[in-house]
Image (cartoon, rainbow, N blue to C red):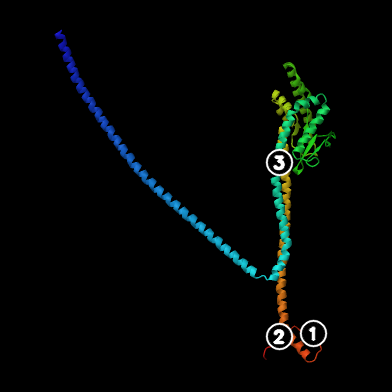
Amino acid sequence: MTEIAIPILITLGLGLVIGYFISKITYGKITSNLKDENQRIVNELTTVKSEKEHYLIEYTKKQTENENLIQQAALKKAELNEIQEKFSKEFEILAQKILEEKSSKFTEQNKFNIQQLLNPLQEKIKNFEEKVDSTHKESIDYHAALRQQIIGLRDLNQQMSKETLNLTKALKGESKTQGDWGETQLELLLEKANLTKGIHFSTQGGFRDDSGKLKKPDFIINLPENKHLIIDSKVSLTAYESYYNAEDEQHKQVALKNHVASIRKHIKELGEKRYTDLYEINTPDYVLMFVPIEAALMLAIQDNNGLYLEALDKNVVLVSTSTLLATLSTVSSIWKQEDQKRNVLEIATRAGALYDKFEGFVQDLLSVGKSLNSSKDSYDAAMKKLVDGNGNLIRSVETIKKLGAKAKKSLPQNLLDRAEENITLE
């Protein structure tokens, strides 16, 4: 047993010694590597610090340059403000000086004459200002009225929607009555949109196409520049009423199909009328087909979502109360703008005429000045002949009177005194 333990102990001792030397060698290598890595990191840190200092110096330099630029800009702005203020004061002084020089040249009589000439001009300017103010006030009133109009149309639409079912029951079964009711509703919307019959729209106008066939659109909306918009009212209530009164789903679906078919029939008939080809009407390529009961149109579109496109292919645009309201409000706005445009043109015409009159007034004023100067020169020349010199007329005729000429009247004493004062010694 002892013999076995001794070799084991020797082996363990050798292993420990060998492990010690191996660990020492490995530790030395690790220590050397760590020192090298540490030195590399120190070198990189030194480089980073150097770059940091460089960037700090550059930043400080740029910051200083920026502050200098800001100061220079502030100085330039102050100089510009000073120059502007200086020019403003100099211009004001110059304008005042010119005004004073011009004003001093007019006498009280000239001022009175000018005032008499200016009164008509002031009256025209006042009328012009009143016209501008009136146009501005009309614009403000128009926008306020338009807002109230939109509110009223919205309330009207809500009221019409509430009465839809009652109207359906009241009008079912008679197509002519339904059509008349639809046209009445359409005309009501036109009037609510502040459009006037006979001015902004007309009804049932007769026009003939190229073949001589008579065409009668329900409503023709007049637009500026002799353009038009055609609206036809189409009411389809019979199948719609049957749909809502159906007692089971089968009858409801049959009524729905009939309702959609009725609207498609109206679209086809309206497209075939080709109102857009009438040479007497300048209209876009599309005709508006008005369905007064919005719920009826929505029901058909829900069942056949291609109905809108089908109508467009036939140059027909489907509109209900809400969508037509927006269109009519736009038309009303266009007419308001057209009226304002005409007012502006009238103002421009009046302004041009006013300018022409003012130019004529200036010429007349210059003529008055020339006449006044000429009259003054003539007056001075006449007075010199009258009272100046030894042979002046006053002294001559007064001498004749003193020599015995009979006269009932005497010349003014101030003229006699002036004539005596102006005698020169020969």
- Crowd around label 2: few <14 · some 14–19 · many ≥20 (10 Å): few
Locate the C terminus by quadrant.
bottom right
CA separation in Å, label 3 and label 1: 83 Å
Q: Tell us which disc is closer to us: 3 or 2.
A: 2
Secondary structure, mark 2, is helix
Q: Amino acid at mark 1?
A: Lys
Note whether 340 is above or below 239 in the view shown: below
Q: Which residue is mark 1?
A: 409
- Crowd around label 3: few <14 · some 14–19 · many ≥20 (10 Å): some
As rendered, which of 320 and 163 lies closer to the eye? 163
Q: Tell us which disc is closer to us: 3 or 1.
A: 1
Q: Position of residue 327 (x, y in %)?
A: 72, 36
As rendered, which of 207 and 375 lies closer to the eye? 375
Note whether 342 is above or below 81 in the view shown: above
Pointers 3 and 1 in contact (CB under 8 A)?
A: no
Q: Which residue is mark 3?
A: 146
Secondary structure, mark 3, is helix
CA separation in Å, label 1 and label 2: 17 Å
As rendered, which of 112 and 16 lies closer to the eye? 112
Q: Which residue is mark 2?
A: 417
* Mark 1 / mark 2, whichever is N-terminal: 1
Note whether 88 is above or below 148 in the view shown: below
CA separation in Å, label 3 and label 2: 83 Å
Q: Amino acid at mark 3?
A: Leu
Which residue corresponds to the image point at 72% horizontal and 17% vertical from the top-left?
249
Q: Position of residue 78 (x, y in %)?
A: 49, 56
Q: Position of residue 271 (x, y in %)?
A: 77, 30
